[in-house]
Amino acid sequence: MTSAARHRVAAIVGLFLSSASLLGTPARAELITLRVGSGHPAGATVYAQGMRDILVPELKRRVAAETDHELRVIEGYAGSIASVAETLEAVQVGMLDIGGYCTCFEPAKLFLHNFQYFVPFGPQDAQGGVRLARQVYDAYPWLDDQLRESYGQFVLGLNGFDNYHLGTTIPWDSVSDLTGVKIAGAGPNLPWLAYAGVIPVQSALPDGYMAMSTGVYSGWLMYPSSYFAYKYHEPAPYYTLIGFGAMGGAAIVTMNVRSFNRLPPEVQTIVAEVGRMYEVEAAKLLDERQIAGLANLRAAGATVRPLPEDARRQWAQSLKDFPNSMAMEANSRGMPGSEILKTYIELVTQSGYQWPVEYAID
């Protein structure tokens, strides 16, 4: 961990510690129980897999190795404790001490946390997306403060999704072929489809297989890792590589503030550090699963093809005003929309990424 990262972790812990009451207090071994979970299944969804396979084991290992305390973790994924649209509230009330969820399922409460969705055709790799999202969170404490003040939780680590493409039950040769076709998505990405004239449908991953099999809708905006893991290629074998971008900060792992406050100070430090470690390692896992997902789709017989570059540029051009409209919407809600979206676009540009369209924020 870099010195800068250590400084940030120390700052997180410092928000909660009262040095006057803790100094000189002898350590007492405790049995600590934490409830960790997500509405998505661990395995099929990468950020939840990272919670199960990276976050939880490392918490257990470090608490056992570095303290006299015993840590017991009760895990609940795939909606066994809270659904994808209930996890924020589950962490808020303490049903979960640590929860992972997509901000896309909280369009009202966490509107501006979806800032990457508001700027499509961005970075194509998840690790880059997560790093850029972290820079935005560090530059604008408002994002974390809103979670603390309104919902009693703070960001333990960022994660997200790999590069978004489009899978359909029907073949199509030109964008105009999608006019009037029902396509599902998570919510904030549905406006991406406006150019194609599709009928957008709000849905959730666990519902997609059956819905496409029965004709409720005919496609999904989906990244390779989950498209294959959820077997979407069976009812919808036509997977077109559009490159709407990897949403590196779209999934957040948060912790209940009261739960954190109850932890011994040395365990608080471990939790904060492991949260940042999860952020880095789970981002690597996202990129690995993207590569494997595409390979598995091809091996399974799905039709995987790139969208012609000129069509992609035209699609991006059709959405050139979308980021600014979302910034104005956030501003109208009393949020720093213009500042955050402008900063995000600038950071992406400074990273060397070439946007297919020039976005302007008022």
Image: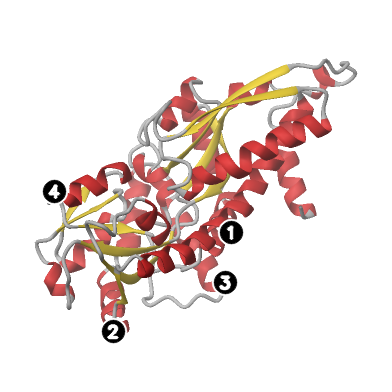
Give the answer, above or below, for where 137 lies relative to 325.
above
Residue where numbered disc 4 is placed:
214
- Label 4 or label 2, whichever comes before in sequence order: 4
Of badges 4 and 2, nearer the viewer stands 4
Q: Where does the C terminus fall, quadrant-wise?
A: bottom left
Of badges 1 and 4, nearer the viewer stands 4
What's the residue type where badge 4 is placed? Thr
What's the residue type where badge 3 is placed? Ser
Residue where numbered disc 1 is placed:
284
Colouring:
secondary structure
Mark 4 → mark 2, Cα distance in angstroms: 33 Å
- Label 2 or label 1, whichever comes before in sequence order: 1
Of badges 1 and 3, nearer the viewer stands 1
Which residue: 48% across, 55% down?
A: 340
Residue where numbered disc 2 is placed:
310
Asked if one can make out residue 339 in the rendered structure from this viewpoint, the answer is no
- Residue 60: % across, % down: 70, 33
Asked if one can make out residue 89 in the rendered structure from this viewpoint, the answer is yes
Residue where numbered disc 3 is placed:
351
